[in-house]
Image (cartoon, grey):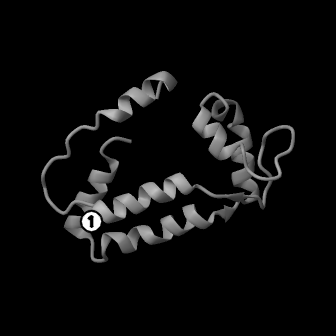
């Protein structure tokens, strides 16, 4: 969501004690190394497969895991790895701002979201 990272940065500036990069490290590790899907997470993804299939990136990330059945649903125990998310989180960890300057609106994301209505 636009502004989420900036809001988290402001909360960190006001209340945070640990370095920003240290806070993001576990999420980066999970995204890089992946994690095994629990039964409930695999079933939740499967239950949302109709919606996920409508969006190429969502389909690629969540419904293209190793060992897929013909249904396209991931099985419990399959590993979800998200290298693109890891790179985004690494960039956020490196470039987190420490000022109170309002963030300028991004110009690229609205064009990318328009074709998928979100």
Tell me which corner region of the image, top left, top right, bottom left or bottom right, holds residue 105: top left
> Which of the pair 76/115 is nearer the observer?
115
The residue positioned 39% from the left and 71% from the top of the image is: 23
Question: Circle 1 is placed at which residue position?
Answer: 12
> Which of the pair 108/34 is nearer the observer?
108
Tell me which corner region of the image, top left, top right, bottom left or bottom right, holds residue 12: bottom left
Q: Is residue 60 left or right of residue 4?
A: right
> Which of the pair 16/30 is nearer the observer?
30
Q: Is residue 50 left or right of residue 28?
A: right
The N terminus lies in quadrant: top left
- Above or below for 79 versus 1: below
Tell me which corner region of the image, top left, top right, bottom left or bottom right, holds residue 45: top right
Density class for disc 1 (Cα within 10 Å; few <14, some 14-19, many ≥20) is some
Q: Position of residue 55 (x, y in %)?
A: 59, 31
- Above or below for 25 versus 51: below
Q: Is residue 102 left or right of residue 4?
A: left
Q: Which residue lies furthest to the right in this view?
A: 70
The residue positioned 77% from the left and 53% from the top of the image is: 66
Q: Position of residue 34 (x, y in %)?
A: 63, 63
Q: Residue furthest bottom?
A: 18
């Amino acid at each position: 969501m636009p502004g989420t990272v900036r809001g988290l940065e402001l909360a960190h500036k006001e209340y945070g004690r640990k370095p920003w990069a240290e806070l993001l490290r576990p999420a980066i590790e999970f995204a890089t190394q992946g994690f095994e899907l629990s039964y409930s997470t695999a079933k939740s993804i499967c239950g949302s497969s109709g919606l996920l299939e409508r969006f190429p990136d969502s389909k690629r990330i969540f419904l293209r895991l190793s060992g897929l059945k013909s249904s396209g649903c991931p099985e419990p125990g399959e590993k979800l790895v998200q290298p693109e998310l890891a790179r985004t989180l690494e960039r956020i960890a490196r470039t987190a701002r420490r000022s109170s300057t309002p963030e300028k609106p991004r110009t690229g994301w609205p064009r990318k979201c328009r074709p998928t209505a979100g």
